[in-house]
Amino acid sequence: MNGELLYTQTSDTVRLHGLLKRSTRDPHPTCDVLIFIHGVGSNFYQAAIAPKVAPVFNRQGISLLSVNTRGHDFVFSVGSGEAQRWYGSANELVSECVLDIDAWIAKCVDLGFKRIGLFGHSLGAIKSIYSQAYHPNPNVELVIAASPSGLSHTAFSASPRAKDYLRCLDWAKAQVESGNGDTIGNVTFPFKLLMSAQTFFDKYGEEENYNFLRFMDQVDVPLLLTFGEGEVNSTNPAFENLDKQAHPIVEANAKLDMKIFPETNHYYSGMQTELAHAAIRWMDSNV
């Protein structure tokens, strides 16, 4: 995806990069720029969805800024020597997404955009909802949350993969309680990857800090929730029946909406342009 390479710096001095695909059309009346927030371990240039949806949004007067968060890639460092700090998906704390998102919103404001939307995928969808539920930014007009996973201790503990999950959780808790939360381990839940004990406990612990079903109705701007039919109909404990669980919450709140895309998966394979068109139709309905 060609565009303008940009960077921003968070309030705690983490430098992040992104790519702006700017629209040359008249700005859309609901949203003139979407900040696309990647999923776990991805980054602004690897995100599979952004390059496919950008042209669709651009034709409707909506620029797309695909950005890095401090959870981009597996690991990266900031600073050097004793001041060196480690980030990436192996080390991130999801709550710190607020710092990243606010920095990118400020960048959009500096660039002259007036109506800013958040468009997150997977963990990026959770970050989009979380940030506006607990630390709403007044410059955000809407949120599109594509396939947020259900980070639920209750669901994981009752799933066929409970033994695997609880083994990883016990390891993470033991490391955190002994003061070794930064220890990197080879976890196997929800899939095989390297992750610090603190990060695993933060994301998947009993507190369910990032179970979006608990806080999505606290978002004060219009919020569109989307899923691929294949993921919610799967036996994956992070997605199984999430549409059914979200339905009563959506029905009870006029600002919430939900769309399920048939015959597609977590990455909206074959339906990515339709995802963008559906989002635009939803925006039009919120003018």
Image: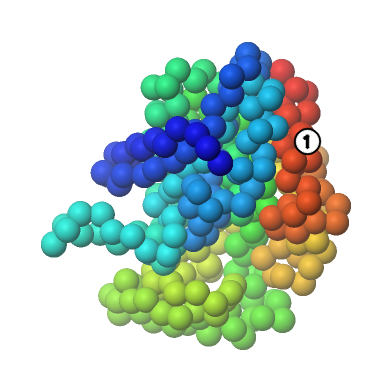
Which of the two residues, 183 or 23, is positioned nearer the viewer here? 23
Which of the two residues, 114 or 73, is positioned nearer the viewer here? 73
Q: Which residue ends up furthest to the right in the rendered image?
A: 262
What residue is shown at x 30% (from left), y 76% (from top)? Answer: 180
Looking at the image, residue 118 sits to the left or right of residue 231; the answer is: left
As drawn, 132 above or below 79: above
What is the quadrant of the C terminus in the image? Answer: top right
What residue is shown at x 20% (from left), y 54% (from top)? Answer: 79
Q: Is residue 254 visible?
A: no
Amino acid of disc 1: Ala
What is the quadrant of the N terminus in the image? Answer: top right
Q: Is residue 3 visible?
A: yes
Q: How is the image coloured?
A: rainbow
Residue 177 image point, x, y percent: 34, 76
**Which residue carries the number 1 mark?**
278
Q: Which residue ends up furthest to the left in the rendered image?
A: 82
What residue is shown at x 37% (from left), y 76% (from top)? Answer: 184
Residue 213 image point, x, y percent: 66, 52
As drawn, 112 above or below 38: above
Residue 141 image point, x, y percent: 58, 26
